[in-house]
Amino acid sequence: MKDKLSLAAEERFGIKADPDAVEKLYSYILDSYGKLDPDTIGRVFSSGEAADFLTVNETYFFREPAHFSFLLDLLPSFTKNSSGEIPPGKTALQICCAAVSSGCEAYSIAMLIEAYNRSAETRLPYQIDAFDINPRVIEAAGQGIYGARTLREDGSVFHYMAEPYLKKTGGAPGAQARRYRLDPSLKKNIRFFVHNLMDALPPKEYDLVFFRNAFIYFSPRYRDRILSNLAAVLREGGILIMGVSETASVHHAGIEEKNRGDVFYFQKSPFTEIG
């Protein structure tokens, strides 16, 4: 019976589910519904209950800081054309954060752009669309309450950018129990929503797509489909940034691997049909 849950995880979410996670989901279904039949499986997968057990939601601010250094270097190219103005027809830098979990990545990007804008000659308008398959973590992202583990040594070089936006809030004594509330002003350019990467994204063109440290959980049979869905919403020349440990496993005709120093990324090839 548990094999049915593993198969459903692969066919509906595209992931190879951890056996322990499947075991916990199996117990939850029996405790909550008393049976494991196709209707019940369909219900827990469509409601988001299954995602709460089967997805990995490890996240923290400014994870893999080399990517944020890379982004900081890129920002001037989005603000000015040869006349020092926003390029014609360009209203805002469009960024997508896929598999965003509870939102640390999206907020980190916003913090970095806001820090850049405070010193830039030309302010860079931006919009961040961030999604995850798990409704619970998207709800948490909207609330913007974070524990101390979301501020780790990895990424500490950028923590000064977070200081204006993370305020200590109530919690039990001790460093690990400390909690932070995100300043609501940072949310104005971020839209969080629930989406399954197995499905096509709403039509839009993004300059940058961040999809980091999630690809490793997808089944090889569905990886090309996932990459096609992301490449389809990248503008020509748009950049896809994957996790450091994932780049070697990325192979897709619509995106070309490139590097800048120690940062590897993927760029959408012009005139390539995605599908």
Image (spheres, rainbow, N blue to C red):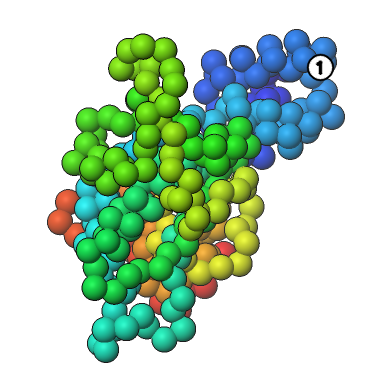
Residue drawn at the location 40% of the way across and 62% of the way down: 208
Residue at x 82% of width, y 12% of height: 34
Please tell me whether mark 1 sits on a helix, a strand or a loop: helix
Residue sitting at x 22%, y 30% = 153
The quarter of the picture where the N terminus appears is top right
Of residues 172 and 157, the one nearer the viewer is: 172
Q: How many marks?
A: 1
Q: Residue at x 48, y 58 (%)?
A: 189
Quadrant containing the C terminus in the rendered view: bottom right
In the rendering, at what x and y percent does residue 115 appear? 28, 55
Left or right of 182 in this view: 84: left
Question: What residue did someone put label 1 on?
Answer: 33
x then y, percent, for residue 175: 30, 17
Question: Depth check: 9 or 57 in front?
Answer: 57
Q: Quadrant of residue 19?
A: top right
Determine whether, in the image, residue 258 is placed left or right of residue 12. left
Q: Is residue 257 shown to the viewer in this render? A: no
Q: Quadrant of residue 126?
A: bottom left
Q: Amino acid at mark 1?
A: Tyr
Q: On the rendered structure, is 111 left or right of 258?
A: right
Residue located farthest toward the bottom when viewing the structure as drawn: 83
Query: Residue 64, how many percent across, how many down?
Result: 27, 41
79 is higher (above) or lower (below) than 3: below
